[in-house]
Image (spheres, rainbow, N blue to C red):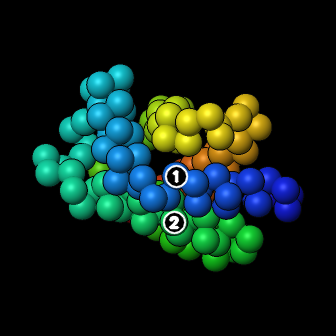
Amino acid sequence: MDQQRIERLESSFNLVAPRAQELADRFYALLFARYPQVRPMFPDQMNDQKQKLIASLVLVVQNIRTPDKLLDPLSQMGQRHAGYGAAPEHYPLVRDTLLEVLGEIAGDAWTEQLNGDWSVALDLVSSIMIEGAKSEAQTA
Protein backbone atom coordinates (compact mmCIF):
# COMPACT_ATOMS: atom_id res chain seq x y z
CA MET A 1 0.00 0.00 0.00
CA ASP A 2 1.56 3.29 -1.03
CA GLN A 3 2.31 6.20 1.30
CA GLN A 4 -0.38 8.52 -0.09
CA ARG A 5 -3.09 5.89 0.33
CA ILE A 6 -1.98 5.22 3.90
CA GLU A 7 -2.09 8.94 4.70
CA ARG A 8 -5.57 9.28 3.19
CA LEU A 9 -6.81 6.29 5.21
CA GLU A 10 -5.39 7.71 8.43
CA SER A 11 -6.73 11.22 7.89
CA SER A 12 -10.18 10.01 6.84
CA PHE A 13 -10.36 7.74 9.87
CA ASN A 14 -9.39 10.64 12.13
CA LEU A 15 -12.30 12.53 10.57
CA VAL A 16 -14.89 9.86 11.43
CA ALA A 17 -13.37 8.59 14.70
CA PRO A 18 -15.14 11.16 16.90
CA ARG A 19 -18.40 9.68 15.62
CA ALA A 20 -17.31 6.04 16.02
CA GLN A 21 -20.35 5.02 18.07
CA GLU A 22 -22.70 6.50 15.47
CA LEU A 23 -20.70 4.72 12.76
CA ALA A 24 -21.06 1.36 14.54
CA ASP A 25 -24.78 1.89 15.22
CA ARG A 26 -25.49 2.86 11.63
CA PHE A 27 -23.30 0.06 10.22
CA TYR A 28 -25.11 -2.73 12.04
CA ALA A 29 -28.55 -1.23 11.44
CA LEU A 30 -27.87 -1.06 7.71
CA LEU A 31 -26.15 -4.46 7.55
CA PHE A 32 -29.06 -6.22 9.25
CA ALA A 33 -31.68 -4.34 7.24
CA ARG A 34 -30.05 -5.27 3.93
CA TYR A 35 -28.81 -8.74 4.81
CA PRO A 36 -31.08 -10.21 7.49
CA GLN A 37 -29.50 -13.61 6.88
CA VAL A 38 -26.37 -12.48 8.77
CA ARG A 39 -28.24 -11.33 11.90
CA PRO A 40 -28.21 -14.79 13.56
CA MET A 41 -24.39 -14.71 13.59
CA PHE A 42 -24.46 -11.85 16.09
CA PRO A 43 -25.49 -11.63 19.74
CA ASP A 44 -28.86 -10.20 20.71
CA GLN A 45 -27.18 -7.45 22.69
CA MET A 46 -24.86 -5.62 20.29
CA ASN A 47 -23.03 -3.18 22.59
CA ASP A 48 -19.90 -5.33 22.92
CA GLN A 49 -19.97 -6.18 19.23
CA LYS A 50 -20.12 -2.52 18.26
CA GLN A 51 -17.12 -1.83 20.49
CA LYS A 52 -15.26 -4.70 18.82
CA LEU A 53 -15.95 -3.20 15.39
CA ILE A 54 -14.57 0.15 16.50
CA ALA A 55 -11.54 -1.49 18.12
CA SER A 56 -10.88 -3.49 14.94
CA LEU A 57 -10.96 -0.37 12.79
CA VAL A 58 -8.59 1.36 15.20
CA LEU A 59 -6.26 -1.66 15.13
CA VAL A 60 -6.12 -1.65 11.34
CA VAL A 61 -5.59 2.09 10.98
CA GLN A 62 -2.97 2.24 13.75
CA ASN A 63 -0.99 -0.58 12.13
CA ILE A 64 -1.49 0.20 8.45
CA ARG A 65 2.14 1.35 8.19
CA THR A 66 3.34 -1.97 9.63
CA PRO A 67 0.97 -4.51 8.07
CA ASP A 68 2.94 -7.49 9.40
CA LYS A 69 1.59 -6.59 12.84
CA LEU A 70 -1.93 -7.18 11.51
CA LEU A 71 -1.40 -10.71 10.23
CA ASP A 72 -1.81 -12.59 13.52
CA PRO A 73 -4.71 -10.59 14.99
CA LEU A 74 -6.65 -10.56 11.71
CA SER A 75 -5.98 -14.23 11.07
CA GLN A 76 -7.25 -15.06 14.56
CA MET A 77 -10.26 -12.82 14.00
CA GLY A 78 -11.01 -14.74 10.80
CA GLN A 79 -10.85 -18.00 12.71
CA ARG A 80 -13.32 -16.70 15.29
CA HIS A 81 -15.64 -15.35 12.60
CA ALA A 82 -15.68 -18.73 10.85
CA GLY A 83 -16.82 -20.23 14.15
CA TYR A 84 -19.74 -17.79 14.14
CA GLY A 85 -20.74 -18.92 10.66
CA ALA A 86 -19.08 -16.21 8.56
CA ALA A 87 -18.25 -17.36 5.06
CA PRO A 88 -16.14 -15.72 2.34
CA GLU A 89 -19.27 -14.45 0.59
CA HIS A 90 -20.19 -12.40 3.67
CA TYR A 91 -17.09 -10.23 3.55
CA PRO A 92 -18.13 -8.13 0.51
CA LEU A 93 -21.48 -7.42 2.22
CA VAL A 94 -19.65 -6.07 5.25
CA ARG A 95 -17.16 -4.13 3.11
CA ASP A 96 -19.84 -2.46 1.00
CA THR A 97 -21.96 -1.57 4.02
CA LEU A 98 -18.98 -0.17 5.89
CA LEU A 99 -17.92 1.89 2.87
CA GLU A 100 -21.39 3.38 2.63
CA VAL A 101 -21.51 4.25 6.33
CA LEU A 102 -18.00 5.71 6.31
CA GLY A 103 -19.16 7.91 3.44
CA GLU A 104 -22.26 8.97 5.34
CA ILE A 105 -20.29 9.85 8.46
CA ALA A 106 -17.51 11.65 6.54
CA GLY A 107 -20.04 13.65 4.54
CA ASP A 108 -18.66 16.02 1.93
CA ALA A 109 -15.09 14.98 2.78
CA TRP A 110 -15.77 11.51 1.33
CA THR A 111 -14.51 11.11 -2.22
CA GLU A 112 -14.35 8.35 -4.81
CA GLN A 113 -10.63 8.15 -4.08
CA LEU A 114 -11.29 7.56 -0.37
CA ASN A 115 -13.91 5.00 -1.25
CA GLY A 116 -11.34 3.20 -3.37
CA ASP A 117 -8.66 3.47 -0.70
CA TRP A 118 -10.92 2.01 1.95
CA SER A 119 -12.13 -0.69 -0.42
CA VAL A 120 -8.53 -1.81 -1.02
CA ALA A 121 -7.78 -1.76 2.72
CA LEU A 122 -10.94 -3.67 3.63
CA ASP A 123 -10.31 -6.24 0.90
CA LEU A 124 -6.84 -6.78 2.34
CA VAL A 125 -8.30 -7.21 5.83
CA SER A 126 -10.88 -9.64 4.44
CA SER A 127 -8.31 -11.71 2.59
CA ILE A 128 -6.21 -12.14 5.76
CA MET A 129 -9.29 -13.06 7.78
CA ILE A 130 -10.48 -15.56 5.15
CA GLU A 131 -7.04 -17.18 5.03
CA GLY A 132 -7.09 -17.41 8.82
CA ALA A 133 -10.45 -19.13 8.68
CA LYS A 134 -9.15 -21.57 6.05
CA SER A 135 -6.08 -22.43 8.13
CA GLU A 136 -8.32 -23.11 11.12
CA ALA A 137 -10.58 -25.35 9.02
CA GLN A 138 -7.57 -27.32 7.76
CA THR A 139 -6.31 -28.00 11.29
CA ALA A 140 -9.76 -28.86 12.65
| Number of residues whose C-alpha sits closer than 10 Å to that of mark 2, classed few (under 14), some (14–19) or many (20 or more) | some
Q: Is residue 111 above or below residue 42?
A: above
Is residue 137 visible in this depiction of the protein?
no
Residue at x-position 76% and y-position 59%: 6
Q: Which residue, given by chain and number where applicable, does mark 2 sit on?
A: 58
Instruction: Please tell me which residue lies in front, 122 or 77.
Output: 122
Residue 109, by quadrant, is top right
**Could you say whether the residue bearing mark 2 is in a helix, strand or loop?**
helix
Is residue 72 visible in this depiction of the protein?
yes
Residue at x-position 74% and y-position 53%: 8
| Label placed on residue 28 | none
Report the amino acid beneath label 2.
Answer: Val
| Number of residues whose C-alpha sits closer than 10 Å to that of mark 1, classed few (under 14), some (14–19) or many (20 or more) | some
Residue at x-position 29% and y-position 34%: 29
Closer to us: mark 1 or mark 2? Answer: 1
Instruction: Please tell me which residue lies in front, 134 or 113.
Output: 113
Q: Is residue 99 left or right of residue 117?
A: left
Q: Position of residue 115 (x, y in %)?
A: 67, 37
Instruction: Determine the CA span between mark 1 and mark 2.
Output: 11 Å
Q: Position of residue 40 (x, y in %)?
A: 21, 38
Q: Is residue 48 left or right of residue 15?
A: left
Report the amino acid beneath label 1.
Answer: Val
Q: Is residue 139 above or below residue 68?
A: above
Q: Which residue, given by chain and number where applicable, does mark 1 sit on?
A: 16
Q: Position of residue 67 (x, y in %)?
A: 70, 69
Viewport quadrant of the C terminus: bottom left
The mark nearer the N terminus, 1 or 2, is 1
Q: Is residue 91 left or right of residue 117?
A: left
Q: Name the residue furthest left.
A: 44
